[in-house]
Image (cartoon, rainbow, N blue to C red):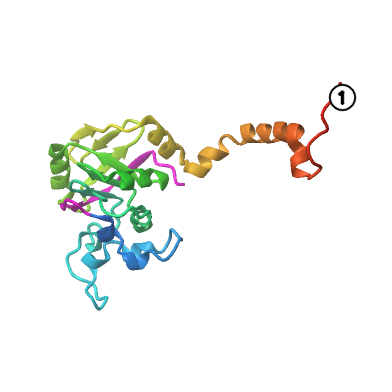
Amino acid sequence: MQKFTTLTSPAAPLPLVNVDTDMIIPKQFLKTTQRTGLSKGLFYEMRYDEQGNPKDGFVLDHPHYEKAEILIAGANFGCGSSREHAPWALIDHGIRCVIAESFADIFYHNCFKNGLLPVTLHNSHVEVLMEHAHKGANAIFTVDLHEQLVTAPDGYKVDFDLDPFHRHCLINGLDHIDLTLEKDHHIEAFETKRQLAHGWVEHGHGSPEPAKS
C-alpha cells in the first residue's frame, strides 16, 4: 500500500451530500477483483450518458481538476452499499484524500485499508475549503498527515482528528496483510514451538503414548 505523508495538490469541489457508493462506482463495474482500471467507472452516471458518451461539466473531467488528488465533498460521503470498489476507483483515478463533513462508517474504514485518507471537518471549515477549491488548478492545498493539518491556498489552516492506529497505517503504508507480516517473527516462533510440542498430529503418527508409571 502506498504511504501517505504530505500531499500537495489542487482540490476538486463536489458540493453534494449523500454521495453513495453506487454513485461513486456503479454496480456494473463490480465484477472485477482487480484494483486497477476502475477509474473509467468512477462517477460513471454523472460523467456519461446512457450511450456512454461523455457529459459536459463534471468536475473531475474539467482541465483544472483532472489531476486533482484531493476531493472536497458534502456530508455523508460514501453511504449506501459496502463496496470496497469505491475507494479503489477513487485511488485509481488519482484521488488520495477526500475531505467532507462526515463519511459512512464502512466506506470510511475501507479508505484506510487502501491508502485513501478521509478527513472529517466541521461544515464551516468544509465550506471555506470548498470556496478555495472552486478557484481551480492554481489553488493548491496541502494535507499533512504527520501534523494532521489541512492548509488552503491562502494559508488558512485547519487541523483534523484521526485515530492513531489509522494514522500509523497510512504513514507507513500498512494494510492488514502488512500488519500481519510485521508479526512474522512471532508467528514463526509460535509455529516452531507448536511443531515441537504437537508435530505428531501433522505427521499422522497418532497421539504419543502415555508415560509409564
Judge whether residue 57 is colored magenta: no
Figure quadrant of residue 7: top left
Q: In this view, does 177 lie to the left or right of 137?
A: right
Query: For the magenta stretch, what is the residue range?
Result: 1-19
For this orientation, the residue located farthest to the right is: 212
For this orientation, the residue located farthest to the front is: 213
Query: What residue is drawn where x is 68% and y is 36%?
Result: 191
| Residue 66 in view in this figure | no
State the image coordinates of residue 126 (x, y, percent, origin top left): 17, 41
Q: Is mark 1 on a helix, strand or loop?
A: loop
For this rendering, which residue is in front, 202 or 72?
202
Query: What residue is drawn where x is 41% and y is 64%?
Result: 37
Q: In this view, does 142 lie to the left or right of 203?
A: left
Q: Name the residue under label 1.
A: 212
State the image coordinates of residue 54 (x, y, percent, origin top left): 24, 72
Task: Give the vertical position of 186 relative to 87 (above or below).
Answer: above
Query: What residue is drawn where x is 24% and y is 46%?
Result: 140
For this rendering, which residue is in front, 68 or 32?
32
State the image coordinates of residue 196 (x, y, percent, origin top left): 76, 33
State the image coordinates of residue 50 (x, y, percent, origin top left): 23, 76
Mark 1, residues whose alpha carbon is within 10 Å: few (<14), some, or many (≥20)?
few
Figure quadrant of residue 83: bottom left
| Residue 63 in view in this figure | yes
For this rendering, which residue is in front, 67 or 51?
51
Image quadrant occupied by the C terminus: top right
Amino acid tagged 1: Lys
For this rendering, which residue is in front, 177 or 157?
177
